[in-house]
């Protein structure tokens, strides 16, 4: 049964859950909880808050299951809920004039493979490559966190959730070209943050 559910599309699992199959909901949680957590974490910048919001998210999925329309993609639907939870939280924090905790999340999901492209010519080079990869991860995390909120949101929806630009435009209420521009600006900022490593990698080739 578990293998069968693992092979089902999200939308099929959601239909089964709507028909009363709790195992289908558990399969959806297992499939999406890590990526959704990473998306929320990079928006609110607090692990404890992200954990609470992800719990709230899946509660809302249960509560709103009947409203899910099967012409929609489940991924877009669930990230729309996650986005709204993040917006509500950040608005409350802004009104309280209280900054979010500034924990630096790991960046395994977003870190580029640049460090892996540096050739390993000897053990010390391999150690250097690992250090560089770690530093790249920290730089990417910091660069993503420093993006303007609108650019960061588009970047995370596209890179983490693989949401198409058209659907991001529908979620955010802006034209698709605006979404693509925000993504382009975000990528340019990240490229600037990593430019010194590109130079270093070319020097080692």
Image (cartoon, rainbow, N blue to C red):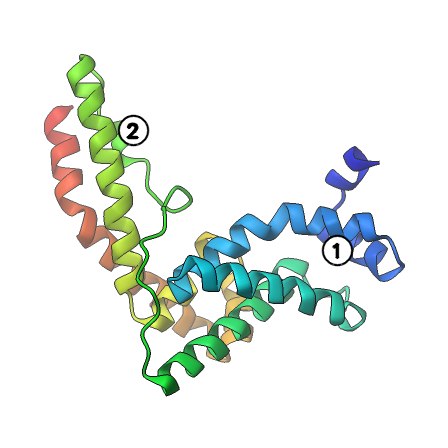
Q: How many labels sit on residues?
A: 2
Answer with left or right where residue 17 lies relative to residue 85. right
Q: Give residue 133's position: percent from left, percent from top.
A: 26, 35
Q: Nearer the viewer, residue 1 or 55?
A: 55
State the residue position of label 1: 11
Answer with left or right where residue 144 lies relative to residue 167. left
Q: Say the numbered circle drawn on residue 116.
A: 2
Badge 1 crowding class, 10 Å Cα cut-off, few under 14, some 14 to 19, many 20 or more, is some
Q: Give residue 131's position: percent from left, percent from top.
A: 21, 31
Residue drawn at 77 percent across, 64 percent down: 70
**Where 153 sits versus 161, above or below?**
below
* Residue sticking out furthest to the bottom: 95
Q: Work out how far the residue at label 1 is from the one at label 2, CA to CA, in angstroms.
A: 36 Å
Residue drawn at 71 percent across, 52 percent down: 10
Q: Give residue 49's position: percent from left, percent from top.
A: 47, 64
Q: Nearer the viewer, residue 192 or 38?
A: 38
């Amino acid at each position: 049964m578990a293998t069968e559910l693992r092979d089902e599309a999200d939308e099929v699992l959601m239909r089964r859950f709507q028909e009363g199959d709790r195992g289908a909901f558990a399969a959806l949680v297992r499939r999406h909880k890590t990526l959704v957590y990473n998306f929320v974490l990079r928006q609110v910048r607090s692990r404890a808050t992200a954990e609470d919001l992800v719990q709230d998210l899946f509660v809302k999925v249960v509560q709103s299951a009947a409203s899910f329309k099967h012409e929609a993609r489940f991924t877009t639907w669930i990230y729309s809920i996650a986005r709204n939870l993040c917006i509500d939280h950040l608005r409350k924090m802004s009104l309280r004039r209280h900054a979010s905790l500034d924990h630096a999340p790991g960046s395994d999901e977003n870190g580029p493979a640049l460090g892996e492209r540096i050739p390993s010519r000897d053990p010390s080079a391999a150690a250097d490559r690992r250090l560089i990869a770690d530093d790249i991860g920290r730089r990417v995390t910091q660069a993503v966190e420093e993006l303007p909120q609108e650019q960061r949101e588009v970047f995370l929806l596209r890179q983490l959730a693989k949401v198409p630009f058209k659907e991001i435009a529908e979620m955010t209420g802006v034209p698709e070209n605006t979404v693509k521009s925000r993504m382009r600006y975000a990528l340019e900022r990240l490229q600037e943050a990593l430019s010194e490593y590109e130079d270093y990698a070319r020097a080692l080739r």
